[in-house]
Amino acid sequence: MWLMLIPEAHRGGDEGGVVELSSIPFAYVQLAIVIVVAVVELAWLMRDMTRRVNAYQFAEQIRKLLAANNPERALKLCNAASGPVTRLARMGIEARMKGGDLYVTLAGATPVLLKEARAGFPAIIALGALASFEGLVLLVRGFEQGTHGDFVWKVLFPLAFLCFTTTLNVQRWLGWERDLTTVRDRMSTS
């Protein structure tokens, strides 16, 4: 991939002259890479959205059900969705039903579930950052070569979308700790 960042390749001929190889096909390969990575970033974001629940509201519902001494209904609520937040709540409810210490169970499970929830995010974010860098180089090369019109716009929109989805994935990666600690803290107070 890094070889594509070279604006033009040169090789010497038998007569001592230099033959320039066009970098236009490489530019379209780079553009395709930016678009593909943007789609991958969006798919990862959509996958993460299916695993998320509003942690504060969810924890409040669980806390109210536990305060009303209705753990079976709380377990049904946890089983309605799948994800680290609901698994943490389920562990807490089961620990409370067995008579175990709720806070110790939740505090012990939080780091494990946080690691699981964040798995894959660093690779996706790094891929997005590399593709964004490649897209910026491609954009600068487009301006340097004087192709301000059509090609620059072809690069600009996918690059902006890629940067947006990468930023959202960073925000989602950072948000998992907040969500899990919210559930842990809200359930521990019940």
Image (tube, rainbow, N blue to C red):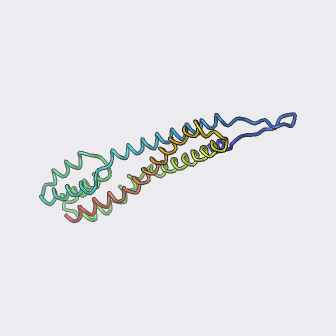
Farthest residue to the right: give it.
Answer: 15
| Drawn side of residue 72 relative to residue 18, left or right | left
The percent coordinates of residue 97 (x first, y second) are 18, 57
21 in relation to 83, above or below: above
Farthest residue to the left: give it.
Answer: 68
Residue located at (24% from left, 62% from top): 186
| Drawn side of residue 63 relative to residue 161, left or right | left
Residue located at (59% from left, 36% from top): 29
Quadrant where the N terminus is found in the figure: top right
Residue located at (51% from left, 38% from top): 36
The percent coordinates of residue 107 (x first, y second) are 31, 63
Badge count: 0
Q: Nearer the viewer, residue 160 or 189?
A: 160
Where is residue 41, by image quadrant? top left
Q: Nearer the viewer, residue 69 or 21?
A: 21
Where is residue 69, by image quadrant? bottom left
Residue located at (52% from left, 44% from top): 159
Quadrant where the C terminus is found in the figure: bottom left
| Drawn side of residue 51 relative to residue 28, left or right | left
Where is residue 174, by image quadrant? bottom left
The percent coordinates of residue 32 (x first, y second) are 55, 36
150 in relation to 105, above or below: above
The percent coordinates of residue 48 (x first, y second) are 37, 47
Q: Nearer the viewer, residue 115 or 50?
A: 50
